[in-house]
Image: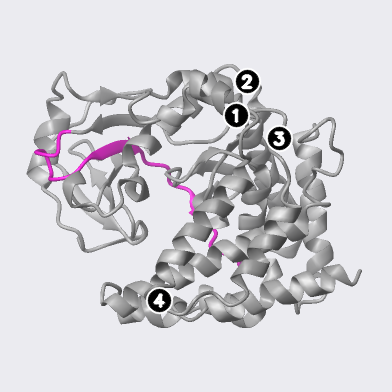
C-alpha cells in the first residue's frame, strides 16, 4: 500500500517508541502533538536518500512520518545538506502563516509534531510529522493523467507555487529561531537589503564549488562563459521578501488520490528567500532538456520529454503565463521585464549551470571512491553534454 522497503538505514525502534510515548520536557513541539501509542512498527520509505525517511505505525494503527539525519552532527561532512531542524521550523512556520491567509493562498504542508535534537535517542536528530496518503507524480509530463485533465493539474501546481511565493516572508521569520536561521533574522535581512542579489550569491557559490571540484576532475566546459551570461542577464530580487522552495520538482508534490489538487509540498530543506524564477526553472527544466538527457535523469524509465517534442517551448510559456495569472502581481513594479516569460532563458541557463556543478561533484566523489558506481554511471559524465546544451541555447537566443 505504501512505498516502503526493508530498513536500509538502521534505527532504534524501541528508543523512538519510548521517547514519543513519554515525551520529555526537552522535546520541541510543533503545530499539533498527537498521543502516540505503543507498540511501534517502523518501515523505511523508498525515497529520502539524503535524509532517511520512515513510516511509523503506532499501536492504534495511526501512521506518522519520521525524518532524520543520516548520522550524528559530528560525523556529517555538511550540516547544511541535512538541515532537518530547518525543515521542521519552516513547515511549522508555513503552517502558522496559513492561518491568516485565504484558502487559495494556503501552502499545503504536513503538520509537524515533534523535533528531537537529543542524539542519544536514535543517534541522530529527527522530527516526526503527519503522514499524508497522497499520490506522487514523478515527471512533469504527468504520466498516467488523461490529457483532458492535465490542464487542471497544471492549474493546481501553479496555484501552489504562487502560494509559496506570495507567503508573507516578514511574518514567517517570526517563527524561525535565530540559532537555526541567523541569516533570516530581521536585523540581518535589513542589513543585507541592497546587497548582492539571490542570483549573484548563487553564482559566487557555484563558482567556488566548481573551482574546488576541478582540482580533482575535469573542469566544466565553457564554465566561465555560462557564469558570465548568467551574471549579465540575471534579474534583481523581487520587491517583496520571497520564499522559494529550492527543490521545486513535481515529485516533491503530493496530489489528492483522485482530484487535480496538491495536498502536500515536501522536502523543504533547501528553501530560502530568493528569486521565484529558480523554482519555475527547476520545475519546468525537463521540457528544456534533450530527450537523451531526460532519459539519463529519469532512468530506468524511458521518456519522451524535451526540446525535440513538438510544441514543447510554447507549452512552457503557457505554464509561465498561468503562473503569472495565479500569482496576480508583478515581481517588480518598477521593472516590467522582471517576469518569468522575459527571463526564461537565463532561468534555464542557471538551472543547467547548477546541474553541471552537481554532476561534476558526483564525478569528484567517484574519483575519490566515495560514490557508488550505480549512481556515478548515471550522473558523473552529464556535465559535458549539459554544458553543450546551455551554450547551444545561448547561441540560439543571441540570434533572435
User: Is residue 46 positioned above or below 132 on the image?
Assistant: below
Q: Nearer the viewer, mark 3 or mark 1?
A: 3
Assign the C terminus to one quadrant of the image. bottom right
Q: What kind of element bears circle 1? A: loop
Tell me which residue sits at (61%, 24%) in the image.
168
Task: Check if mark 1's residue and mark 2's residue have beta carbons within 8 Å.
Answer: yes
Q: What kind of element bears circle 3? A: loop
Q: Is residue 105 visible?
A: yes
**Pointer 3 residue:** 238
Tell me which residue sits at (55%, 23%) in the image.
191
Q: Is residue 306 visible?
A: no
> x and y percent of residue 330 in the render?
80, 34
- Horizontal side of 370 relative to 303 (left or right) equals left
The numbered mark, 1 or 4, whose residue comes first in the sequence reads 1
Q: Callout 3: 10 Å neighbours few (<14), some, many (20+)?
A: many
Looking at the picture, tell me which residue is in the foreground, 365 or 196. Answer: 196
- C-alpha distance separating marks 3 and 1: 21 Å
**Pointer 4 residue:** 363
Q: Nearer the viewer, mark 3 or mark 2?
A: 3
User: Is residue 99 positioned above or below 244 on the image?
Assistant: above
The figure's colour scheme reads one colour
- C-alpha distance separating marks 1 and 2: 6 Å
- C-alpha distance separating marks 1 and 4: 40 Å
Answer whether residue 43 is magenta in the image.
no
Tell me which residue sits at (56%, 46%) in the image.
201
Looking at the picture, tell me which residue is in the foreground, 381 or 395. Answer: 395
The numbered mark, 3 or 1, whose residue comes first in the sequence reads 1
Looking at the picture, tell me which residue is in the foreground, 189 or 154. Answer: 189
Give residue 101's mark: 2
> x and y percent of residue 109 in the render?
48, 36
Q: What kind of element bears circle 4? A: helix
Amino acid at each position: 500500500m505504501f512505498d516502503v522497503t526493508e530498513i536500509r538505514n538502521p534505527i532504534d525502534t524501541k528508543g523512538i517508541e519510548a521517547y514519543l510515548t513519554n515525551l520529555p520536557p526537552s522535546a520541541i513541539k510543533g503545530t499539533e502533538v498527537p498521543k502516540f501509542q505503543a507498540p511501534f512498527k517502523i518501515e523505511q520509505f523508498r525515497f529520502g536518500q539524503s535524509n532517511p525517511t520512515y513510516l511509523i505505525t503506532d499501536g492504534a494503527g495511526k501512521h506518522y512520518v519520521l525524518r532524520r539525519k543520516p548520522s550524528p552532527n559530528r560525523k556529517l561532512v555538511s550540516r547544511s545538506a541535512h538541515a532537518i531542524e530547518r525543515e521542521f521550523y519552516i513547515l511549522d512556520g508555513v503552517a502558522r502563516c496559513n492561518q491568516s491567509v485565504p484558502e487559495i493562498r494556503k501552502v499545503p504542508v504536513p503538520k509537524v509534531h515533534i523535533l528531537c535534537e537529543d542524539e542519544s535517542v536514535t543517534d541522530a536528530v529527527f522530527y516526526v510529522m503527519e503522514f499524508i496518503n497522497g499520490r506522487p507524480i514523478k515527471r512533469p509530463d504527468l504520466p498516467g493523467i488523461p490529457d483532458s485533465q492535465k490542464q487542471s493539474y497544471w492549474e493546481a501546481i501553479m496555484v501552489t507555487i504562487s502560494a509559496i511565493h506570495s507567503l508573507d516572508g516578514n511574518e514567517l521569520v517570526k517563527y524561525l529561531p535565530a540559532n537555526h536561521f541567523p541569516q533570516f533574522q530581521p536585523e540581518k535581512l535589513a542589513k543585507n537589503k541592497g546587497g548582492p542579489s539571490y542570483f549573484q550569491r548563487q553564482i559566487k557559490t557555484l563558482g567556488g564549488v566548481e573551482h574546488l571540484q576541478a582540482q580533482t576532475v575535469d573542469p566544466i566546459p565553457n564554465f566561465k562563459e555560462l557564469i558570465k551570461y548568467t551574471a549579465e542577464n540575471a534579474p534583481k530580487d523581487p520587491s517583496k521578501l520571497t520564499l522559494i522552495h529550492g527543490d521545486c520538482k513535481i515529485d516533491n508534490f503530493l496530489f489528492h488520490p483522485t482530484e487535480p489538487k496538491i495536498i502536500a509540498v515536501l522536502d523543504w530543506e533547501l528553501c530560502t528567500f530568493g528569486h521565484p524564477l529558480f523554482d519555475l526553472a527547476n520545475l519546468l527544466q525537463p521540457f528544456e532538456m534533450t530527450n537523451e538527457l531526460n532519459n539519463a535523469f529519469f532512468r530506468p524509465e524511458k521518456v519522451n520529454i524535451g526540446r525535440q517534442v513538438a510544441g514543447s517551448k510554447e507549452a512552457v510559456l503557457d505554464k509561465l503565463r498561468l503562473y503569472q495569472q495565479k500569482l496576480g502581481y508583478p515581481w517588480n513594479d518598477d521593472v516590467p521585464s522582471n517576469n518569468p516569460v522575459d527571463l526564461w532563458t537565463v532561468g534555464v541557463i542557471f538551472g543547467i549551470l547548477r546541474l553541471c556543478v552537481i554532476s561534476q561533484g558526483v564525478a569528484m566523489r567517484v574519483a575519490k571512491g566515495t560514490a557508488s558506481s550505480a549512481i556515478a554511471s548515471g550522473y558523473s559524465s552529464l556535465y559535458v553534454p549539459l554544458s553543450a546544451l546551455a551554450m547551444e541555447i545561448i547561441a540560439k537566443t543571441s540570434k533572435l
